[in-house]
Image (cartoon, rainbow, N blue to C red):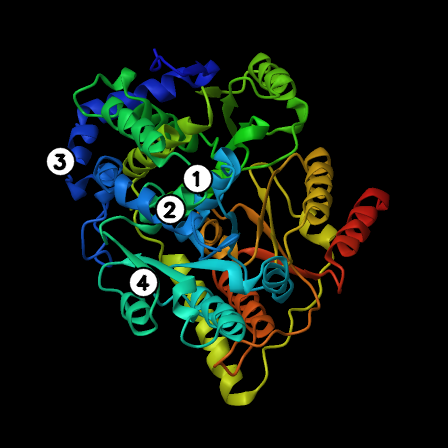
Amino acid sequence: MPPQGGQSVFLGDQANAVADAIARLEHENIVNRVWARDQTVWPVDHSEVFDRLGWLTVATEMRNQVADLKQFAAEIKGSSFTDIVSLGMGGSCIGSEVIRQVCGRQNGYPHLTVLDSTVPSAVRAVGRATDPGRTLYIVSSKSGQTIETKSLYQYFRSLVEGCVGKHEVGSHFVAITDQGSSLVDLSRDEGFRRTFENSPEVGGRYSVLSYFGLVPAVLTGIDIEKLLERAASMTIRCAGSNPLVDNPGAWLGAYLSAMAFAGRDKLTLVTSPGVASFGLWVEQMLAESTGKEGKGVIPVVGEPLLDARHYGDDRAFVYLRLENDDNAQADVATERLVSSGYPVVRLEFSDAYDLGSEFFRWEFATAIAGSLLGVQPFDQPDVQRSKNATTEIITAFEQKGTLPADPVVTPFRSLLAQATAGDYLAIMAYVEPSIGVESAIFAVRRKVMQESKVATTFCYGPRYLHSTGQIHKGGPNSGLFVQMTTDEDNLEIPGESFGFGTLASAQATGDFQTLLHSERRVIRINLGRDAEAGLLHLLSELCTAK
């Protein structure tokens, strides 16, 4: 029997596979060993030289900081700031974006915008939508060395200085970083309003319940005490003293690994509209943690809901259902999946603040799945490979003034023609986020699913480099990768010899090269100057081609 309370399950012919995974957890005493911080639960990883298990207790520990965080939020609310812009990449900011979308903003508090792009039009759009003289910027980086975050800081610091002058500019910036990082020194030297130093024992994608997620949340009026209470409650439920069948995180981890071993490694999230953005966070958690050594759970988020006949035997489902939301379509779709024999786990949100408990459930489940799969869930070696490739391209640009030539154009149809059972299509778009772009890509995904019966994923570049980029290169070699770029005017980065356009191009090319070196099937499509128009043209070609 699966754990009760907020969860229902249909496993069909996969029931024995999950039962076997649970039996292995019990036989190897894995849950108790995790809580004992026994790192032999996972393969030894010498690149991780310190403990990365601080997330196990961070929710409880951060409850001691609630009063201070609320006081800081009151200070900002009582000031002239109308907006907050969070500058970061990957785990440093995805969690705060999810909390923003699910929990909303309380009246009277500043608006929050999360900027995790180097695409010039995306950076310009944030600059135009906010008044730098009335904006508080949160610079989020564990290491303080992330090139995207550093570049964004340099750009917006220049804008703020132009509005308020050199002596006041520091008061418009807040840092969230690890203890002792270079960002701590920068924030002190440049007079930041506040620096929040996080424990280095909490890895980036496991940091949502630390300062990285809580500072942006409290500044927009979200009740972080309630969020942490829910997380602490789930922490207790996942304790090693509880029977495995009543341990929500351990059971989910067993399900994830069992499905991957059974060939159902496309973990497809179905969500209520109100918690749809939670998929962004789950996507990074699973892809970056498990996608190694040719293994992994491939998260499929935001996909069109189609009839069961359009799904392959490589699918397993989790339905994240928010009570009192508009759930009719998702309810019907998941019932049809159950009727067709697909494994479906339904997790219930009673309200938006159950986000806190779900953050911990999925963190614990991912750690458990990593152990069962035999991968190290706290490193990201292939993310670093793409970073290194980008650095090499930027260095060459600074020396020669040119970027590598664009890849040879390959028709989209020729990539799709290579699809076989168990493959998936990954769309990686270096474009400014917009409703129009997402609608067009949604339609492309639908068409591909209907024709090829393969799973589809989509993420903006360079965001994906810090999330699904790991599983693209380190996970199963079952991906069909299409990188989408646009023709954009460059945007200067103060103090650098390259601009945002150059940086984004270097990131796209560096990742393209890394995918090729990993023997992945990858093409690039240039959408022209209008990304939405380019996507609609691509969709038209897909619909008319024989």
Which disc number belongs to residue 221? 1
Question: Of label 4 and label 1, which has the lower sequence position?
Answer: 4
Label 3 crowd (10 A; few <14 / some 14-19 / many >=20): few
Residue at 40 percent across and 26 percent down: it is 354
Question: Looking at the rendered structure, which numbered label has been put on residue 36?
Answer: 3
- Asked if the residue at tag 1 contacts the one at tag 3, i.e. Cβ–Cβ closer than 8 Å, the answer is no
Q: Label 1 is placed on what type of residue?
A: Gly
Please name the amino acid that badge 3 sits on.
Ala
- Quadrant of the drawing holding the N terminus: top left
Q: Residue furthest bottom?
A: 400
Decide: is 507 above or below 381: below
Which SS class for mark 2? helix
Disc 4, disc 2: CB below 8 Å?
no
**In front of the other: label 3 or label 4?**
4
Q: In which quarter of the image is residue 375?
A: top left
Q: In which quarter of the image is residue 374?
A: top left
The C terminus - image quarter: top right
